[in-house]
Amino acid sequence: MVPQKNDEVRLALEKVWLNSRPQALGRVATLQRFAENLRSGIPDQQSRQNALSAAHRLSGSLGMFGFDEASSCAAKIEALLGDGPMPDVATTVALVERLRMLLEGAQPCSGRREKRRS
């Protein structure tokens, strides 16, 4: 009976992810806009706050779906965006791109974890 229950939980989690995925990708887009503003030398506090909120929400929710590496990546972005000077452009852009790559085509807890890419 336990394997059947695990399958039910996995299927329910996949359904929740399918419903949540557009919102998660929207948050990644917010991070991408901030990274582009940062790269262009025109970041503003509002876009930074929006990106900080998006990173915080992603770092909290992605782990629930089994996306541990993506959650960690979002947490690193969140830490970069915290109080202090504007974050390093190259580091921020690389982390945001990594997060985007990790979420493209990601499937939650389906026995297959995020693909590791160097």
Image (cartoon, helix red, strand yellow):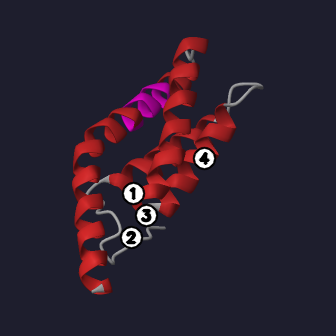
Q: Secondary structure at mark 2?
A: loop
Quarter in which the N terminus is drawn: bottom left
In the picture as drawn, the residue positioned furthest to the right comes out as 84
Circle 3 sits on which residue?
66
Label of residue 11 in the image = none
Residue type at mark 1 is: Leu
Q: CA distance from mark 1 to mark 4?
A: 14 Å
Which residue is rendered at x = 49% and y = 26% of the image? Answer: 34
Dot 1 and dot 2 residues touching (CB under 8 Å): yes
Tell me the tag on residue 102: 1
- Mark positioned earlier in the residue sequence (3 or 1): 3
In the rendered structure, which disc, 1 or 2, sits on the residue that comes first in sequence?
A: 1
In front: mark 3 or mark 1? 3
> Label 3, label 4: how many angstroms apart (C-alpha)?
15 Å
Question: The residue tagged with tag 3: helix, strand or loop?
Answer: loop
Residue type at mark 3: give it: Gly
Secondary structure beneath dot 4 equals: helix
Q: Earlier in the sequence, mark 3 or mark 2?
A: 3
Residue receiving disc 4: 75
Q: Tell me the amino acid under the disc marked 2.
A: Lys
Is 89 on the left or on the right of 26, as rendered? right
Nearest to the observer: residue 118 or residue 69: 69
